[in-house]
Image: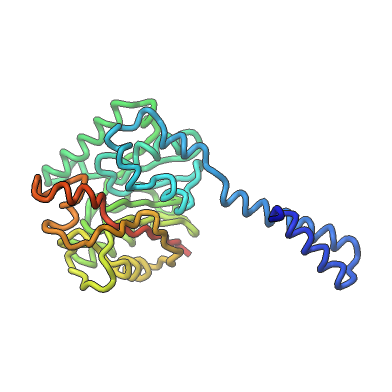
Amino acid sequence: MQPLFTMQAKLALNRDAMFNQPGKTVKKALLCAALAVFSWVTAHADDAALRAAIAAPSRTPAFVSRDVWRHPYETLSFFGIRPDMTVVEISPGGGWYTEILAPYLQAKGQLVLAADDPESESPYARNSIARLQKKLAGQPVVFGRVAVGVFSVPKKLQYIAPQSADMVLTFRNVHNWAADGEDTVAAVFTSVFKSLKSGGVFGVVDHRLPSSRTQDLTASSGYLRVDYVQRIAQRVGFTFAGASEINANTLDSADHKNGVWALPPTFANKEVDREKYAAIGESDRMTLKFVKP
């Protein structure tokens, strides 16, 4: 097989000869072919900095063991992340992705965590942000440049200045917002839309309910249909830019007792059928990319 540049260059030359164009056009055609190849290579180039962040010894070993299910390199690459971006992670939880995003964005970009409100009336929320702040303070070399904004549905949703983010990411959180109804999901998505620059990306990963199933409006099982997420994102103004199957799991039937939490890493059913759930692995997941026009 001929190299891509050689193939495109020959095509340009043949086309030029066919139409008897001046030699200047040949040079232009070659330049266009070279630029096309450069763009293709750039878009598909390996991101060494991202691989280094994923391989960093600072990551929690228990988190690293889940890479086989969560595919961080492929997922973030699909969203189009770059180290010079301003990226928001909504509801970072224990910081699984934070441990990758922080060192990756440290030198040239900015990571903003849209985290729980320390003044929340909810003890769970207060404990959650306290654990996160302790984690960040414990590794200043890794997390020293991470900014933290407040994310509390429905009242506190301005976790970054409007139109200042290049990318907003959320991992396995939409089903939590859906528990309070579709309007709550729309409110969160609207906040994302407002925070992004034009052309900015909204990346969503969540547990996937088969399209043949009826969507529980409160997502009590933890699973969501893809069209549910797409419809709300498009309702607030996003354009759907594509989906990836990198986080698919065909072994997951999405009909477990106690929902998605029966699967690892939660194992909500304790020792009941634990081996079966362990063999299934983590949930079947949608990986969706939206863009702000």
**Quadrant the N terminus occupies:** bottom right
Look at the picture and state if 198 lies above or below 96: below
Question: Would you place residue 217 above or below residue 59 in this image?
Answer: below
Residue 245 falls in which quadrant of the image?
bottom left
Q: Position of residue 142 (x, y in %)?
A: 38, 29
Residue 118: x percent and y percent?
20, 40
Instruction: Examine the rendering and report whether any part of residue 35 can be seen.
Output: no
Q: How is the image coloured?
A: rainbow
Residue 81, image x, y percentages: 47, 48
Dividing the picture into quadrants, the one containing residue 285 is bottom left
Which residue is located at x 49 percent, y 33 percent?
A: 107
Residue lying at 22% horizontally and 72% vertically, measured from the top left: 213
Q: Give the side of residue 135 with respect to residue 239, left or right.
A: left
x and y percentages locating residue 198 in the rendered image: 49, 59
* Along the line of sight, the residue nearer the viewer: 254 or 232: 254
The residue depicted at 40 percent of the width and 33 percent of the height is 145
In the image: residue 282, left or right of residue 45 = left
Seen from the viewer's position, the closer of residues 240 and 224 is: 224
**Left or right of residue 268: residue 15:** right
Labels in figure, total: 0
Name the residue: 34% across, 40% down: 98
Q: Quadrant of residue 227?
A: bottom left
Closer-to-camera residue (139/61): 61
Given residues 84 and 278, the one toward you in this image is 278
Residue 52 visible somewhere in the drawing: yes
